[in-house]
Every structure is written in C-alpha cells, then in structure tokens.
Image (cartoon, rainbow, N blue to C red):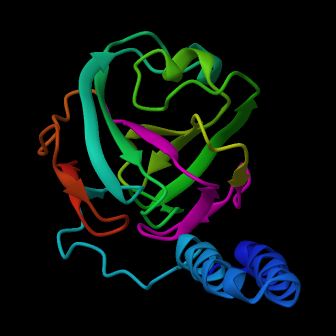
Amino acid sequence: MHPEGRRFVVIAALLALLAAVLWLPLAGPGILLTLGVYLFFRDPERVTPADPRAVASPADGIVCMIMQTPLPAALEAGNTPVWRVSVFMSVFNVHVNRMPAAGTILKSHYIPGKFFNASLDKASEDNERHLYLMRTENGQTLAFVQIAGLIARRILCLVREGQTLTRGERFGLIRFGSRVDVYLPPGVEPAVRVGQIMVAGETPIASL
C-alpha cells in the first residue's frame, strides 16, 4: 500500500468499528469499506519493458482518447502538434502514477480548476491538473499531465523540477479516479488503441 493511503485506511477502520458498536449488522459494510480503501491505495511492484526505447503507460486504466494536439501552453514548450494518449483510471484501478520514460523533470506546474468527468476532452483544459515537462535520456521532450476527475479531489506530486528519474519510478498519484495524458515527442506515434487496457510502468505506449 502507498503511504498516502495509511491514514485513510485507519479512518475507514475506525468508522467500521464505530458502526459495528452502534449496530452490529453494519460491521459487514464497514469491513468492505475498509478493504475497498486499502485496495484503492495498493501499490504493486511493476516490471518495465525490456526495450529501452519504450514509453511506458504512466497509469493503470483504459486508453480513452488518442489525438494530435500541441503541448499545454503552461509548459511553454512550443505549439507543434504531437500525439496525446489519454489513460482513464476508474476507482478500481491502481492510482499510483509512474514515469513513462527515464529523464529529467524540466518543469512541474500545478493548475487549479474544475472537476468535470475526466473522460471528457475538455478536462484537459478545464479540470484541476498537474503538468510535467521532461527531457528523456536521449534528449527528446516528453510531457505528461495528471488530471483530476469528477470524484478525484487531490493530485499528489512526488517529484520536483531538476530531478532525474528512471522509467517506471513513482511520480505521484490521484485520489479516487481520474486521468493521465502523455504527450509524445514530435515524430513519435502511439502504438496503442482506444479501449486498450494499460498497466502503469509496464504497457508500452510508443517507442522513442
């Protein structure tokens, strides 16, 4: 379990205990709630792709959109259209996010916003989100964005500007469902399709 979830599991367990004391039939639902919170914050180990050029999915979930668009203006990285792959996470997915490639974080930028359904395209512009710009080990520019959703209310960033990380390393999480967008480097095309199931840190999205 990710350390971020420990206090939530404790809170759920205490509520379950209180409910059971007040009325014993509530013990069952209370135990299920505690188990559900624990499962939400699970943090299994992952095995990155053997190909060093592979861009790994930053999130568990389903590819909900693939389109060409410029990088977010807040990153100040130009307006050349690139491929964007969006991975939608439901409340049943692992919510720990992992680095899609090895490299250095050039920019980390948080933007407050609304909480529309994260599967909608407008969530990329209107929802609360945290943007990252990185330079890969071979010098290419890659961006990724954590987007809060209808239920998600907290984006947690675990990295800082100037930090160098390996592919598959944890960089953050989003509580209770949301989306992560990956903006591939210019000239790099996605190798996934809409509806495909992704595993964070393992499933290749593209090849650099």
Q: Is residue 105 magenta?
A: no
Q: Where residue 89 sits in the image (x, y, percent)?
A: 42, 50
Q: In this view of the protein, can residue 28 be seen by the observer?
A: yes
Q: Which quadrant would the N terminus be assigned to in this image? A: bottom right
Q: Farthest residue toward the top?
A: 79
- Position in image of residue 72 (x %, y %): 53, 19
Quarter of image, res 23:
bottom right
Q: Is residue 206 left or right of residue 166?
A: left
User: Residue at 17% of width from left, 43% of height from top?
Assistant: 195
Q: Is residue 72 visible?
A: no
| The quadrant where residue 113 appears | top right
How many numbered marks have been drawn onto this rendered protein structure? 0
Residue plotted at (37% across, 60% down):
60
The spot of residue 192 in percent (x, y) is: 13, 45
Left or right: 65, with 40 as reference point: left
Left/right placement of residue 92 relative to residue 66 reads: right
Q: Is residue 143 placed above or below 23 in the rendered structure? A: above
In the image, residue 71 lies at what x, y percent? 46, 21
| Residue situated in front as seen by the camera: 39 or 62 | 39
Q: Residue at x 76, y 26 (%)?
A: 112
Is residue 204 found left or right of 95 in the rendered image? left
The residue positioned 30% from the left and 75% from the top of the image is: 48
21 relative to 135, above or below:
below
Question: In front: 27, or 130?
Answer: 27
Q: Which residues are magenta?
A: 157-185
Vertical order, 196 against 98 (above or below): above
What is the quadrant of residue 76 in the picture? top right
Residue 175 or 16: which is nearer the viewer?
16
Task: Say if the magenta span includes residue 159.
Answer: yes
